[in-house]
Image (cartoon, helix red, strand yellow):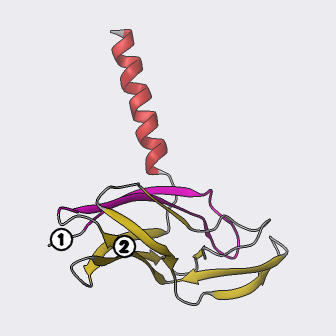
Amino acid sequence: MKKVLLAITALMITIGAKAQVESHVRWAYAAKKISATEAVVLIKATIDQGWHIYSQNVGEGGPIKTTFTFAPSKEYTLVGKPSEPKPITKFEKSFNMNVSYFENAVVFQQKIKLKSAKASAVKGKLEFMTCNDQKCLPPDEVEFSVPLGK
């Protein structure tokens, strides 16, 4: 009985700790076929007011940049690197350098070449860091699966 009680207590502590994780970015995914052999994967970040995430192009010694890692697949190949709109670039004292970031919302796009008509989804993970004018949260990693549709 003690072991069961201990296991339940540990589970409740774990759930409580997860519930307190601060998050200020929500991710959404979509894909758009542009031809029979090409598609564009759209990855959208919606960012809470007063917070921002960093561009994919941040110099050494700066914050954690947003990165995308796509799972290898026999059904598609990546065409180039993910694109992003023009970011806001400002000097940040905490990093002692100019950094590029996005506020409110941003859509990243990855073009892919379809190698199979059976291609059903693009999978991968992304890493990003969220900051406001007072603090930065630890980097976060999110796995994704974007259906390609027909």
Q: Quadrant of residue 103?
A: bottom right
Residue at horizontal 29 percent and vertical 75 percent from the top:
31
Residue 128 in magenta stretch: yes
The magenta span reads 118-147
Are the residues flagged by discs 1 and 2 in contact, CB closer than 8 Å? Answer: no
Mark 1 and mark 2 lie on one chain; the one further toward the N terminus is 2
- Residue 67 appears at what percent x and percent y? 56, 65
Q: Which residue is mark 2?
A: 112
Residue 19 in magenta stretch: no
| Horizontal arrangement in the rendering, residue 23 relative to residue 58 (left or right) | left
Q: Secondary structure at mark 1?
A: loop
Can residue 83 be spotted in the picture? yes
Q: Residues within 10 Å of mark 2 (few under 14, many from 20)?
A: many
Residues 59 and 1: in front is: 59
Q: Which residue is mark 1?
A: 149
Residues 123 and 51: in front is: 123
- Residue 142 appears at what percent x and percent y? 45, 57
Give the main secondary structure, helix, strand or loop, of the magenta stretch.
strand
At label 2, which amino acid type do we have? Ile
Residue at horizontal 41 percent and vertical 18 percent from the top:
6
